[in-house]
Amino acid sequence: MRIFHVSEENDITVFHPRLPDRLDLDPEKGLVWAINDTCLPNFLTPRNCPRVCYHIGADTTEQDKRAYIASASCSHVVVIESKWFETMKNTKLYLYEFDSNGFTLQDKNAGYYTSETTQYPIAKFELENLFDEMFKCNVELRIVDSLWNIYDEIQKTTLNWSMCRMRFALPRK
């Protein structure tokens, strides 16, 4: 298994644990965050780009596959709002790879791993065309006017899903 940290910053040499702002985590325990390669496409967007991401999991039904994944060659979907298209076109990302030793699984569905100790990347990759990177990962990319319909729907399916940066999404109508 490979794990990564995705950033718009190109010069990170060390990752120190940071206190989380999520309410479901211990606010006194600093963490270094990483994502596994299966869920990496969820982060191949500009940092604050709101997105609904989902992929086929072990318990996903054929009905949900047919209803929510249009391409037979894809098992992963990332949905973004149309207002983010230009920003995504013009954003460069840096992929920092970690040695997985010292990391523990934080959320299997979302592919999150954390470490309570300082981490040093073992490799860095520059990603200049985020759309190409998605397609290389066999991701079906959808661009919609609003995320809220798919946000509400996907949570009722058997797909593995993750919603990111929804506070930056257009308001519900």
Image (tube, grey):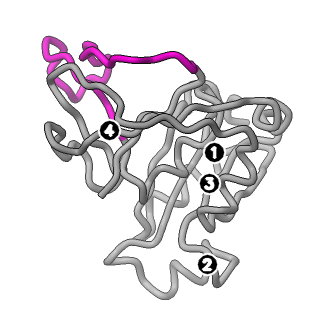
Which residue does the image show at 60% across and 43% down from the upper left? 44
| Contact between labelled residues 2 and 3, with CB atoms less than 8 Å apart | no
Label 3, secondary structure: give it.
Answer: strand
Question: What range of the chain is rendered magenta?
Answer: 9-34
Q: Quadrant of the C terminus?
A: top right
**Residue 133 in the image: x percent, y percent?**
67, 52
Residue 19 against residue 75 in the figure, above or below:
above
Q: Mark 4 or mark 2: which comes first in sequence?
A: 2
| Contact between labelled residues 1 and 2, with CB atoms less than 8 Å apart | no
> Which amino acid, mark 3?
Val
Label 1, secondary structure: give it.
Answer: helix
The circle drawn on residue 78 is 3
> Which amino acid, mark 4?
Phe
Q: Nearer the viewer, mark 1 or mark 3?
A: 3
Give left or right: position of 109 versus 64: left
Q: Quadrant of residue 136?
A: bottom right
CA distance for labels 1 and 3: 14 Å
Q: Main secondary structure of the magenta part?
A: loop
The circle drawn on residue 148 is 1
Mark 4 Cα-neighbour bin, 10 Å: few <14, some 14–19, many ≥20: many
